[in-house]
């Protein structure tokens, strides 16, 4: 098959899976439904590997034109290049593993077929997002993943206790994303106004080669609008509070959508638009600081969360912040590298937490866990690998990808480097806290839960093992050239190779000596935190405090820095108030009263309406109908 | 000519149909009419103007009786005639469907609306415009909720006064032209000041019917007391007449006033988008939420019309189709809830998704379409209108764009409060076959227009290119 056909098959398979399960799934056995959904994903992944292996040149496949007007056309087109294929590999690969995991995790769920329909549909939308050749396709997928995210966060909407809360979490996610989407949409309008096209390749040619650049402030506005879109989808300040709430969804959803794929769409958007951002230094600077602050704030909040999934959610926000720091420095491939390794280890950690929750009979509070390592050994081992990878333990994937961002930071400014190291340190602190509290010490849950503790079935542990292997070896993708010189910076070269504009971005690398110095510092930091945590939580056996015992900074961290309360006060309350005032005062008092008065006056004085008030309006109208019909018929006969 | 007279024929035929077969006869009638319309669509080439009736004579008042259609006229006819059977189908299981008078009025309305879309004469347009008021009024009067009396007075007087504005404008034109045929009216050159007043007269009639802020106060009340079928007719079909009237009559007759009126009407349109959107956020009555949602959506369409360029107008017609499909779907859902629970209060609902999964699914499809998500008919239309508003002025685009956010808030709130959570009621009958069929047909339309909107654009495009050159 040619690349064209392969790409179409990759796109069509998840859609067909969703369609088939959506229509027929209800009456089919769960095993079949799950196998179909998972099967199409693995097939899709294999086809992506084939395309990846064929190393074709950049290629645009025209499907059809959605709309053509006098000035421009919006096309359904696919762009095959290094970046889109790389993202497709992540989406289909990690997606397939999470589908497999879900087969075990969702086994007893009533909505089994619906779950897999939504998952497949999500993958389709996500593939449109990354494979499209223009911003319209991106926006199409962007909105599409938003809906799937909504449907999957609120998946258990009928739950007697939490149904409505799940729904509200889903709604919050959707609405916050929509605010970002509005920004993105305006960015698109500006691009259309300026360039008359939304195709990446044409835009990059216009910007970079023809140097047909708009005014500085226009470019600033465009990039800021795109970035606002990115803050919504990728959960950055100020639009990040939906992501922790999105943990209301089933755990595989958190792994797939809210860790590995959808939330990285914002990073993808910026990398795709590198030809804009590279020429808008102001936006880059803003992006850098937003990313940095988000990273620190989220890491700080994660320190005192006691819900295993909430810790991971804030961790995701924090890691996404790091990626935006990288983007702010123009280190696009470093950001994609971190997207990749993060997809591995964060999916692993979420699936691991799913396995824990599964074993714990749906308990998510880490204060009720403890000592789980001997009950669920495979989950324990893989979770440990995930923890070490994210904390930056030497030679695991997270170590390399973080190190690359840190290396860029050193070249940027030493203060930035300091703050990033702080973020890295906080990450290690909350992750080791989580790990030790869950897997070490004594079991703190109820006797009943304890008797029920069990390792997950094979279809849940295999994805864990595969992701663990990827988390260990993922760093090989972009080695800094110290270990194996021959495949040095492979990913950077691969991405620069044929992605619009990227090859024009200068990617600098530190000398070997400096790299080793930086790595040593990072390793030392991680090791110290690991030892201290071990001593603190295991040797001294210190446990997580109850909420009432929080003091000082712990109050701020535990209460999520009061972001929800502040937003409620600043935005939700005023809009609700406005809704009430508009209705009570403007609508009912001013507009309605005045019109009623007017109508009253007319109906008292008017002849026609007086007749109606005497009750024969129906007759009157009847005669009017007859009259008009008669008139028409008369003229028709006459001519 | 059969296009116009068929509804009248079936309306009269109903008089002799036995009561048992009335509801069937109604649907069959509208389907035959749809068949006739499809015949016209197949033979139509978008570049043409087809004359349906031309007596080549002028009566005393300058009435020429010319009738015909171009792309936009025929598009409105096929849209209307395709939706009439769906509306009858969705009400098939209700007692109203057995009423001879109801079916007759629906067909008379179809007659009047077809005439209105075909009219190539100002007086004829006005006559059909007034004629549509009668059947809808009678449907509301005969089958509406008990508290309808004062509300219907307001509705009738309000729309009647609006129509007077149009009549005055036509009378003002009578001295300037030999007859009222469309070509003669277009040929009139006006000084800006009189153009302003003439456009205002038309606008009053159209703004009330659509309705545009601040002329909307009859609408939520009327939609609420109307029987579901009446609400569908009003929201999905009748307001299209006004939107069509703005494109085909109001602006082309007085293009000299376009620049003057543009800012004013666009402002009213987008104020309506935000104002109605904000109010919908806190409403408890599900029909009222969707009524305000409709005001919000048509505000955007109205603003789009006044831009009066080909691209915006194309998007306008896409949005007209979208709004019709979505409005029928939403009011069908609201009607099902009201009918089975005897309440419209969303706080008294909840947990229905678990009891009636089919209803939950199709309601969700419609709700998502209302939010203009990808794969639904609103996506491209909203994108294009917002884009053009943004090009007109970025502040306008930004304010109108807030519909993305407000739309999500009120739609999801209404859906979740009624469908999610623990069931508050013990039983809720899932969709009947006719309701399912109606939802299905609407969704097919929504998805087709969502993926391939170009079919609408190809149809109306050439006419719009012509019409947008008039200014």
Image (tube, coloured by chain):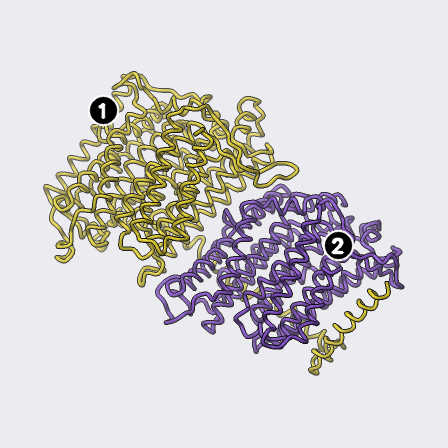
Chain colours: A yellow, B purple
Residue A534 position (above or below residue A102): above
> Residue B159: percent from the left, percent from the top?
69, 67
> Residue A586: percent from the left, percent from the top?
58, 64
Q: Chain of mark 1?
A: A
Q: Is residue B334 left or right of residue B166?
A: left
> Residue B192: percent from the left, percent from the top?
80, 50
Q: Which sits in the foreground, B238 or A42?
A: A42
Q: Secondary structure at mark 1?
A: helix
Q: Secondary structure at mark 2?
A: helix
Residue B152 falls in image quadrant: bottom right
Q: Are marks 1 and 2 on the same chain?
A: no
Instruction: Bin the neighbour count of mark 1 within 10 Å (Cα to Cα): few under 14, some 14-19, many 20 and up.
Output: few
Instruction: Bin the neighbour count of mark 2 within 10 Å (Cα to Cα): few under 14, some 14-19, many 20 and up.
Output: many
> Where does label 1 land, which residue?
A520
Q: Which sits in the foreground, A103 or B370?
A: A103
In which quadrant will I find the N terminus of chain A? top left
> Residue A549: percent from the left, percent from the top?
20, 53
Whether residue A552 appears in this view of the structure is no
Residue A398 falls in image quadrant: top left
3D distance between C-alphas at marks 1 and 2: 77 Å
Q: Residue at x 35, y 52 (%)?
A: A113
Q: Residue at x 36, y 58 (%)?
A: A157
Q: Closer to the observer: label 1 or label 2?
A: 2
In which quadrant will I find the C terminus of chain A? bottom right
Residue A482 position (above or below residue B309): above
| Residue B249 circle label | 2
Q: Residue at x 68, y 66 (%)?
A: B109
């Amino acid at each position: 098959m040619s690349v064209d056909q392969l790409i179409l098959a990759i796109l069509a398979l998840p859609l067909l899976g969703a369609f088939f399960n959506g229509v027929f799934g209800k009456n089919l056995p769960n095993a079949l439904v799950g196998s179909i959904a998972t099967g199409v994903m693995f097939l899709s992944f294999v086809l992506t590997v084939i395309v990846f292996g064929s190393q074709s040149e950049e290629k645009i496949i025209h499907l059809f034109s959605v709309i053509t007007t006098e000035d421009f056309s919006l096309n359904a087109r696919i762009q095959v290049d290094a970046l889109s294929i790389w993202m497709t590999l992540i989406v289909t690969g990690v997606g397939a593993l999470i589908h497999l995991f879900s087969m075990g995790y969702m086994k007893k769920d009533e909505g089994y077929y619906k779950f897999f329909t939504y998952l497949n549909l999500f993958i389709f939308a996500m593939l449109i997002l990354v494979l499209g050749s223009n911003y319209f396709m991106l926006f199409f997928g962007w909105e599409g993943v938003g809906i799937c995210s909504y449907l999957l966060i609120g998946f258990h909407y009928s739950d007697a206790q939490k149904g409505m809360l799940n729904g509200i979490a889903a709604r919050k996610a959707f609405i916050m994303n929509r605010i970002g989407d509005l920004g993105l949409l305006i960015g698109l309008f500006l691009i259309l106004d300026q360039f008359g096209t939304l195709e990446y390749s044409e835009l990059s040619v216009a910007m970079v080669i023809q140097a047909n650049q708009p005014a500085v402030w226009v470019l600033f506005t465009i990039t800021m609008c795109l970035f606002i879109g990115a803050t919504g989808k990728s959960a950055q300040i100020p639009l990040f509070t939906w992501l922790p709430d999105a943990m209301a969804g089933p755990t595989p959803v958190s792994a797939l959508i809210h860790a590995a794929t959808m939330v990285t769409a914002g990073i993808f958007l910026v990398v795709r638009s590198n030809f804009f951002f590279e020429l808008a230094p102001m936006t880059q600077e803003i992006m850098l600081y937003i990313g940095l602050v988000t990273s620190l704030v989220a890491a700080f909040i994660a320190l005192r969360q006691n819900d295993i999934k909430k810790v991971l959610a804030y961790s995701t926000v924090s890691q996404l912040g790091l990626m935006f720091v990288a983007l702010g420095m123009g280190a696009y491939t470093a950001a994609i590298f971190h997207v990749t390794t993060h997809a591995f280890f964060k999916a692993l950690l979420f699936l691991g937490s799913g396995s824990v929750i599964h074993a714990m009979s749906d308990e998510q509070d880490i204060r009720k866990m403890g000592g789980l390592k001997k009950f669920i050994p495979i989950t324990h081992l893989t979770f440990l690998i995930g923890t070490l990878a994210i904390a930056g333990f030497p030679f695991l994937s997270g170590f390399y990808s973080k190190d690359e961002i840190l290396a860029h930071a050193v070249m940027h400014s030493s203060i930035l480097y300091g703050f990033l190291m702080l973020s890295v340190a906080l990450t290690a602190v909350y992750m080791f806290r989580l790990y030790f509290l869950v897997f070490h010490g004594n079991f703190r849950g109820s006797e009943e839960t304890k008797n029920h503790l069990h390792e997950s079935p094979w279809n849940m542990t295999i994805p864990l093992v595969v992701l663990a292997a990827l988390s260990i070896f993922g760093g090989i993708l972009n080695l800094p050239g110290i270990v194996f010189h021959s495949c040095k910076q492979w990913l950077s070269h691969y991405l620069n190779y044929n992605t619009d504009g990227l090859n024009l971005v200068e990617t600098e690398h530190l000398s070997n000596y400096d790299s080793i110095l930086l790595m040593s510092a990072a390793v030392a930091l991680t090791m110290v935190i690991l030892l201290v945590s071990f001593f603190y939580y295991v040797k001294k056996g210190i446990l997580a405090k109850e909420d009432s015992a929080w003091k000082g900074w712990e109050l701020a961290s535990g209460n999520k820095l009061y972001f929800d309360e502040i937003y409620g006060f600043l935005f939700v309350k005023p809009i609700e108030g406005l809704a009430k005032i508009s209705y009570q005062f403007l609508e009912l008092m001013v507009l309605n009263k005045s019109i009623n008065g007017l109508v009253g006056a007319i109906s008292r004085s008017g002849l026609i309406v007086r007749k109606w008030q005497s009750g024969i309006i129906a007759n009157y109208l009847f005669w009017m109908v007859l009259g008009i019909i008669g008139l028409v018929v008369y003229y028709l006969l006459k001519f | 000519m059969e296009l116009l007279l068929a509804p009248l024929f079936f309306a009269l035929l109903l008089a002799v149909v036995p009561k048992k077969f009335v509801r069937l006869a109604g649907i069959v009638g509208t389907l035959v009419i749809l068949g006739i319309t499809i015949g016209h669509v197949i033979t139509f080439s978008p570049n043409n103007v087809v004359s349906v009736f031309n007596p080549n004579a002028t009566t005393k008042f300058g009435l020429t009786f010319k009738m015909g259609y171009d792309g936009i006229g025929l598009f409105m006819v096929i849209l209307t005639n395709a939706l009439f059977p769906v509306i009858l189908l969705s009400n098939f299981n209700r007692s109203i469907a057995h009423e001879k008078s109801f079916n007759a009025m629906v067909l008379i309305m179809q007659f009047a609306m077809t005439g209105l879309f075909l009219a190539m004469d100002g007086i004829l347009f006005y006559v059909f415009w007034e004629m549509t008021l009668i059947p809808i009024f009678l449907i509301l009067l005969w089958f509406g909720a008990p508290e309808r009396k004062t509300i219907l007075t307001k509705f009738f007087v309000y729309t009647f006064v609006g129509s007077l504005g149009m009549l005055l404008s036509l009378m003002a034109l009578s001295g300037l032209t030999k007859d009222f045929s469309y070509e003669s009216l277009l040929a009139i050159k006006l000084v800006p000041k009189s153009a302003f007043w003439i456009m205002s007269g038309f606008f009053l009639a159209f703004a009330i019917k659509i309705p545009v802020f601040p002329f909307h106060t009859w609408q939520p009340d009327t939609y609420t007391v109307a029987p579901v079928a009446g609400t569908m007719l009003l929201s999905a079909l009748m307001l299209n007449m006004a939107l069509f009237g703005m494109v085909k009559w109001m602006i082309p007759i007085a293009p000299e006033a376009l620049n003057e009126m543009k800012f004013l009407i666009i402002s009213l349109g987008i104020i309506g988008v935000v104002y109605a959107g904000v109010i919908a956020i806190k409403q408890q009555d599900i029909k009222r939420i969707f009524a305000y949602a409709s005001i919000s959506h048509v505000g955007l369409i109205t603003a789009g019309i006044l831009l009066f360029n080909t691209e915006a107008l194309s998007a306008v017609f896409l949005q007209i189709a979208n709004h019709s499909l979505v409005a029928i779907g939403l009011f069908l859902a609201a009607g099902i809830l009201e009918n089975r629970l005897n309440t419209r209060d969303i706080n008294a609902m909840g947990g229905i998704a678990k009891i009636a999964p089919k209803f939950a699914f199709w309601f969700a499809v419609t709700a998502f379409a209302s939010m203009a998500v990808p794969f639904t008919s609103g996506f491209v239309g909203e994108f294009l209108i917002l884009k053009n508003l943004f090009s007109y002025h970025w502040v306008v685009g930004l304010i109108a764009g807030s519909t993305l956010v407000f739309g999500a808030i009120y739609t999801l709130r209404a859906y979740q409060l009624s469908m999610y959570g623990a069931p508050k009621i013990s039983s809720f009958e899932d969709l009947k076959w006719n309701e399912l069929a109606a939802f299905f047909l609407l969704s097919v339309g929504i998805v087709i227009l969502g993926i391939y909107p170009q079919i609408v654009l190809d149809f109306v495009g050439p006419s719009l290119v012509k019409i947008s050159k008039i200014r």
